[in-house]
Image: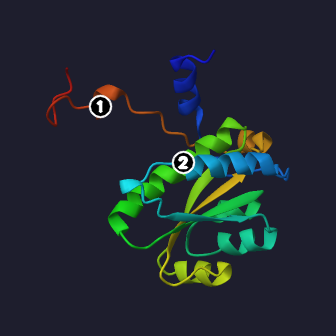
Amino acid sequence: MTTASDKISFLKSLRAIREFTPQPIPDDVIDDVLEVARWSGSAVNRQPWEFIVIRDKDTLKKLATVEGHAGHLAGAATGIVLVMAGESFEHETYDEGRLAERIMLAAWAHGVGGCIGWFGENGRSEVKAALGIPDNKFVRTAISLGYPDYEVRKNRPRREQPRKPLSEIVHWERYGQHNR
């Protein structure tokens, strides 16, 4: 039986993975990830999203060059581009963040790593053209997925910043009050 402590440990273990092995992700894993995405919460349960699942290496490499921060798509086994309805920017921005994190967690449950990337304002039209996304839709986020290449990670220089202690970031009742 999984305890709350086990679940919390799993949530805390999620990391952005940007280097992947060439191993493809099985269809049933992608289906699980998409099912979790489908069940993500959204404002007024509008579910203002659609997903473009990309496995074609040339397309992933092309998207990796678009203005923004999605270069990790180039080495991914699969990419998922989030296409938002484009009807309520404020609500959809919040929903998009929730959705992206849940996709990464669902993938991680299968041992598949991922990283959230974004397309810059000037690159979004390139993404729409490359993927056939209608003009009235909004696209900003892509998630790279793949099995982590631990050898590359092990040899990469570490620039990890330690987590701030709760005593520095939690305020009780009012800003500046760090004690309960």
Q: Nearer the viewer, residue 27 or 68?
A: 27
N-terminal label among 1 and 2: 2
Left or right relative to 116: residue 64 = right
Residue, far front: 45
Q: Nearer the viewer, mark 1 or mark 2?
A: 2
The amino acid beneath tag 1 is Glu
Query: Residue 27: x percent and y percent?
Result: 80, 51
Using the rendered image of the protein, determine whether residue 76 is visible from the camera's viewpoint.
no
Q: Residue at x 54, y 32 (%)?
A: 11
Which of the labelled discs sits on residue 168, or is there none? 1
Query: Residue 153: x percent and y percent?
Result: 71, 43
Which of the labelled discs sits on residue 68, or is there none? none
Up/down of 34 relative to 159, above or below: below
Left or right relative to 91: residue 56 = right
Here the colouring is rainbow
According to the image, label 2 marks what residue? 39
Residue, far right: 23
Residue 80 quadrant? bottom right
Query: Residue 146: x percent and y percent?
Result: 74, 50
Q: Nearer the viewer, residue 54 or 121?
A: 54
The amino acid beneath tag 2 is Trp
How far is disc 1 from disc 2 in space, using C-alphas?
Answer: 34 Å
Q: Assign a secondary structure to mark 2.
A: loop
Q: How many marks?
A: 2
Q: Residue at x 76, y 50 (%)?
A: 20
Q: Residue at x 54, y 40 (%)?
A: 160
Q: Residue at x 57, y 52 (%)?
A: 38
Q: Nearer the viewer, residue 28 or 173?
A: 28
Up/down of 177 relative to 94, above or below: above
Up/down of 41 relative to 53, above or below: above
